[in-house]
Amino acid sequence: LLSYTRSMDVVVHLKSIFARHGIPEVLVTDNGPQFSGSHFQAFAACYGFEHVTSSPRFPQSNGEAERAVQTVKRLLKKSSDPYRALLAYRATPLQNGYSPAELLMGRRLRTTVPALPSLLDPALPDYHTLGAKEREKRWRDARTFDKRHKARNLEPLVPGQEVWITDARAQGTVISAHEAPRSYRIKVPQGTLRRNRHHLVSMQTDGEGVEPVDEPVGEDTPTPTVRTRSGRVVRKPDRLNL
């Protein structure tokens, strides 16, 4: 466990993990100062992995990591032995039927819970079936979330478009789309910002997208007939005919 979150401490801890499990191709982190400094960038270049950051001020874009942090924090608060709590978490099967240890190492871990020796023999999961289950679960979770929160896809922004940055309460201009999904680089008077599409509201200039319409003169627009659920016609009082 980390005692400090300085960049050099994080790098040493990651080196220990990479020496045990190998170097990943892509490492996704938030935009903490320990990940944005030159020391961490030099570490990524030396070890040959791509460092991708989530959208600033939008933890939802890094939801898997945020959820994992909440789970581990809850475990550490309830346990007097943090390593025993982590062991139990890594040996507990997930919804797909495999534990984190089985997915990573291809075998079950021996814990304080009695188990047959044959259950501890190495056995690789069926990754084809596992991948199908994971994709189905992600699709089902995304559909439930979109339905509950009435989510909708926002239109993509183009370079040069004027936007309003809701969290910064400032106006800016789109420079380009970021490599991360739904993320953009925005030019503001103070410099350059990176924000998620969730924080950006398109601003239309005066008259943009508006076509003049010739309105007829001297013609009365017919009033639509309004009926109640029972079929009765609703008639407005004469005093409202202004």
Image: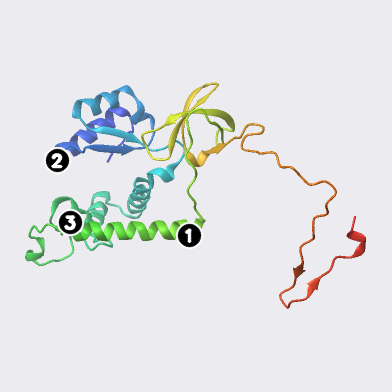
Q: Is residue 233 left or right of residue 37?
A: right
Report the front residue among 195 and 204: 204
Q: Is 153 rendered above or below residue 120?
A: above
Q: Amino acid at mark 3?
A: Tyr
Viewer can see residue 166? no
Q: Which secondary structure lies at badge 2?
A: helix
Residue 34 position by quadrant: top left
In this orientation, which residue lies closer to the viewer: 230 or 209?
Answer: 209
Q: Quadrant of the N terminus?
A: top left
Distance from disc 1 to disc 2, alpha carbons, whole Å, reads 42 Å
Disc on res. 127: 3
The residues bearing labels 3 and 1 have C-alpha atoms spaced at a distance of 30 Å
**In the rendered image, which quarter contains the C terminus?**
bottom right
94 sits left or right of 114 in the view: right
Q: Residues within 10 Å of mark 3 (few under 14, many from 20)?
A: few
Comparing labels 3 and 2, the label whose residue is closer to the camera? 3
At label 1, which amino acid type do we have?
A: Lys
Q: Position of residue 19 (x, y in %)?
A: 14, 36
Look at mark 2 in the image and give the residue it sits on. Answer: 20
The coloring applied to the image is rainbow
Residue at position x 22%, y 32% in the image: 49
Nearest the viewer among 52 and 66 is 52
Q: Amino acid at mark 2?
A: Arg
102, 50: nearer the viewer: 50
Helix or strand or loop: what does disc 3 sit on? helix
Name the residue tied to disc 1. Answer: 147
Is label 1 or label 2 in front? Answer: 1
Q: Tag 2 or tag 1, which sits nearer the N-term?
A: 2
10 Å crowding of disc 1: few (<14), some (14-19), many (20+): few
Residue at 73% in and 78% down: 230
Residue 82 visible in image: yes
